Amino acid sequence: MADVHSKESRSYNMSKIRNKDTKPELLVRKFLHSRGFRYRLRTKQLPGKPDIFLSKLKTIIFIHGCFWHSHEGCKFSSTPKSNLDYWEPKLNRNMMRDHINEIELNERGWNVLKVWECDLKKDKIEETLQKLLLLIDPSATGV
C-alpha cells in the first residue's frame, strides 16, 4: 500500500517528532521534582540512555511512546499499513533493543521502570504517577 502522504509531507511530519523533552517526559519530570526527587537525564554511560535516572535510589525510568516501542494491546500502538518493509523491522528492533537494555540494567543492579505514553493521558495520569511514586519509594505516602 502506498503512503497517503507525499514524500515531502512525510519527511516534514517525521522531522517534527521529538526524541527528548517530550510532553510525557516533562510531565513525569515535573511530578518527580515536585516530590523532592532529584535526577539526571539521558546518561550515555547506561544502556538505552534512560530518560530519567535516580542514582541514589538505583532506579531508572524509561518513558516510552506507545507507537515507537510497540505497546502491546494499546490503541495508540499500531503498525502502519504502508511501507511495511521498513516499519515492521524498525519496530521489532526497537522492542528487542528495549528488552536487551532492560536485562543489562537489571544485571547491573538497577531498578528499571517503564511509563507508557498512554498512561499519562488525562484519565490515567494521577493513578500512573502515584504508582510510579510507590515503585520508586515504597515508603512514600502518595500525597
Image (tube, rainbow, N blue to C red):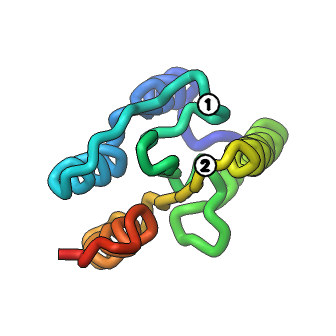
Mark 2 falls on what kind of element? loop
Instruction: Report, in whole angstroms, how far the alpha carbon at label 2 lies from the one at label 1.
Output: 10 Å
Which residue, given by chain and number where applicable, does mark 1 sit on?
46
Name the residue at 26% across, 53% down: 32
Q: Is residue 138 left or right of residue 140?
A: right
Mark 1 falls on what kind of element? loop
Q: Is residue 51 left or right of residue 125?
A: right
Q: Are marks 2 and 1 in contact (CB under 8 Å)?
A: yes
User: x, y (%) of residue 45?
Assistant: 60, 23
Picture mark count:
2
Quadrant containing the C terminus in the rendered view:
bottom left
User: x, y (%) of residue 116?
Assistant: 49, 61
- Residue 14 can be seen, yes or no: yes
- Tell me the amino acid under the disc marked 1: Leu
Name the residue at 34% across, 34% down: 21
User: x, y (%) of residue 73?
Assistant: 64, 74
| Earlier sequence position, callout 2 versus callout 1 | 1
Would you identify the image quadrant in which residue 41 lies?
A: top left
Labelled disc at residue 110: 2
